Image (tube, coloured by chain):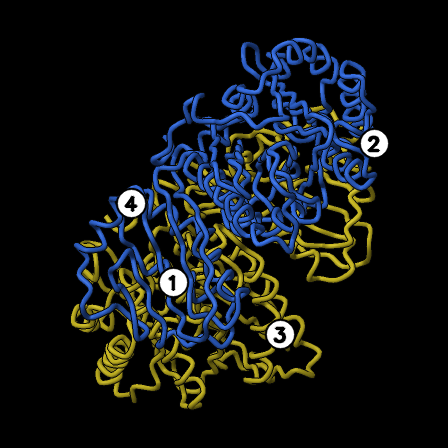
Chain colours: A blue, B yellow
Amino acid sequence: MPVKLRAPKASSLLPVKGVRLGFAEAYVKKPNRKDVLVMALDEGCHVVGVFTQNRFCAAPVALCRQFLAEKTEIRALLVNTGCANAGTGGEGLKLARQSCEALAGLLNLKANQVLPFSTGVILELLPVDKVIAGLPAAIENLKADNWLNAAEAIMTTDIVAKGTSRQIQLGGKTVTITGISKGSGMIHPNMATMLGYVATDAVVSKAALESMIQFAVNKSFNCITVDGDTSTNDSLIFIATNQAGQQEVTENSPEFSLLRDAFTEVAIELAQAIVRDGEGATKFMTVAVEGGKNDTECRKVAYAIAHSPLIKTAFFASDPNLGRILAAIGYAGIEDLDVNTLQLYLGDVLVAEKGGRASSYVEAQGAAIMKEPDILVRVVLNRGAHAVTIWTCDFSYDYVRINADYRS
Amino acid sequence: MPVKLRAPKASSLLPVKGVRLGFAEAYVKKPNRKDVLVMALDEGCHVVGVFTQNRFCAAPVALCRQFLAEKTEIRALLVNTGCANAGTGGEGLKLARQSCEALAGLLNLKANQVLPFSTGVILELLPVDKVIAGLPAAIENLKADNWLNAAEAIMTTDIVAKGTSRQIQLGGKTVTITGISKGSGMIHPNMATMLGYVATDAVVSKAALESMIQFAVNKSFNCITVDGDTSTNDSLIFIATNQAGQQEVTENSPEFSLLRDAFTEVAIELAQAIVRDGEGATKFMTVAVEGGKNDTECRKVAYAIAHSPLIKTAFFASDPNLGRILAAIGYAGIEDLDVNTLQLYLGDVLVAEKGGRASSYVEAQGAAIMKEPDILVRVVLNRGAHAVTIWTCDFSYDYVRINADYRS
């Protein structure tokens, strides 16, 4: 079950002026579930995206990159679950393009004004006829207050729909930021198997929006891992509809950081929600590595811990078998690491220092913390001033069950 | 259950002249199990070793390195299970040294003529009194034909004892090579959580033996992975007792490669046995990556596949969800990889080419192969002439169970 995570209420996901959302049950893979989402954007929006770094990127990712590079005005997003349309070669590209053409035809747009997104099984061609057959229903129910339905329509093995909203004051106007995301396995930075869509009605320049998405993704979706697998389909999209009526936010505006930080908060909440709903997750782990010479070595240590199946199964068992964390620190790849000068904390408790167990450490302390649903693992390297924080979850029987049964 | 692996018969593990082995039930952690092993070596042996690259190397590993560097004649090896004596700082070093001193006293040696080895839980101090109390019994039963008992005495979560022998002709004499090893989680190259001891009675120069262990470890223990965790205690030892009476094998002898290859064969069999008995393993996977520009990129792809929990759980389920393999190839980190020119084979069956599913591929073929206990995953990169083969196992409920319960 998700770790301290509930689906948002429909009323808590605030409409963003200029964005309407509609869904369909198109039976892409399974009957009776929302599996097609259409997001329709008013004229005048800016749309920016970051995508998977997987070389086997999916056909829709390739098209997104192409359409964004063509600098047409993006007016609609089309998402399907049930099939990733990845590892499908030239034929997959053709099918993804067909789906864009179909939606463009219904909305009176050009194909390259529609960004396509797919998530699901890899190595299977998109059943494009089913997706297209679902489009009229999705268009029929396009509404501004449909964010929760949209969050549900993009779920795959997610148990809980993920979404959040913020409002801030910008230049005397209230602007809204609303986002949704989906996980929940094949989650790894650069990026997760995830789809994320965050929209604001704020007036913001495209360059500023580009800068914000880069900043936010590095603080959020690039800091989470469930199983270390980087998906073929990861996509994060930021949308600015420019309808809030304030003065445009540019990279030099005093209000730039306000809006950027609000986007980042939303992105962190959506990213953490993916981990809290990680496949089979029973614990949410924050891994904080500080005192490093640079970010790279902090990340190495953090991911060595976050990826270790031995550590993740010990957390699942609430077993303070913390030597496994020392082992992971030791093999993380810092060649000149002096294990005698670092400290390992579990929550506030000092567990290890001087190359071994801290003299003050009593196992009952570790055992108590391991029972919590949210656990902080903190490593102080004492080599420099850099720090990195990432989030992950434990590794349970259910992870194996979910992934062994995924296609059945 | 181990994948196509049985314990050797006692009679199949051939004595090596100059090596005697004795064990004890010392209750290091659990009662009624062999948990202390003594290997006594005649005078005139060469002993060489390779050890974990983990910065948190265990106290016994630090002492082994020190004693081997001191170039005293090694006359005994002392192994305990039940406690790794790793992450134990200066106090752990003291205890490991005490155990060497105790055995040295009983055998009339100096402490630095005894190499210590420990495996078990990390972050706990060696219960040295228990180990020492077991030494007289171990010395009492020192015998040349005790290899199977020795293999059993070093097991931790291993289900099956691991050992093998070879005999070859060298300079008109029959020489014997016998080795034992233990796994079975925290297994990753450089090296596995493993202990391995391989001895020959052949006459061989120390330099040649050094060269042989480096060659053999790179073809064997550095090519296996169970869970990607590199242990703090990995140690592989080669011993030459120099009693077979043939002319000494040096690095320039025509017979050098004969002996080296026999050592390597033994090492590969012992390393593969560790994977076949990997924690919770139900499938043995050979991952062969060929056609790479260099070994490094072949290894990247091979390990991306071998470490993916998504792939390993799909193999556990016998589910030919092969898109996950494409995804792993895609995120392995080859920046200029052209996914349209590589091929993926499962056994002999071409699964994917030209960026997608091969037109000849029928899922029933994949499903049939996935049911086998031994499965070959072959990736042809078509970029160069380099190739790497590694071995791993699947990821089952039992992996989680074993590691969640490890300390209980």
Q: Which residue is mark 4?
A: B405
Please, what secondary structure does the residue beneath circle 1 have? helix
Q: Is residue A364 above or below residue A240?
A: below
Between tags 4 and 1, which lies in front? 4
The alpha-carbon separation of the residues under discs 3 and 2 comes to 59 Å
At label 4, counting other C-alpha atoms closer than 10 Å, the crowd grade (few under 14, some 14-19, many 20 or more) is some
Q: Residue furthest front?
A: A172
Q: In the drawing, what numbered circle is on residue B147?
A: 1
Q: Which residue occupies 60% across, 20% down?
A: A21
Specify the amino acid type for callout 3: Leu
Q: Position of residue B170 (x, y in %)?
A: 62, 74
Q: Which mark is residue A90?
A: 2
Query: Looking at the picture, does residue B393 appear above or below residue B59?
Result: above
**Residues at marks 1 and 3, CA–CA distance in whole angstroms:** 23 Å
Q: Position of residue B327 (x, y in %)?
A: 65, 41
Question: Dot 3: what SS?
Answer: strand
Discs 3/4, front:
4
**Which secondary structure, mark 4?**
loop
Tag 4 and tag 2 share a subunit:
no
Question: N-terminal of the two: label 3 or label 4?
Answer: 3
Which residue is the site of mark 3? B170
Q: CA distance from mark 4 to mark 1?
A: 30 Å
Residue closest to the eye, A144 or A357: A144
Q: Nearer the viewer, residue A271 or A173?
A: A173
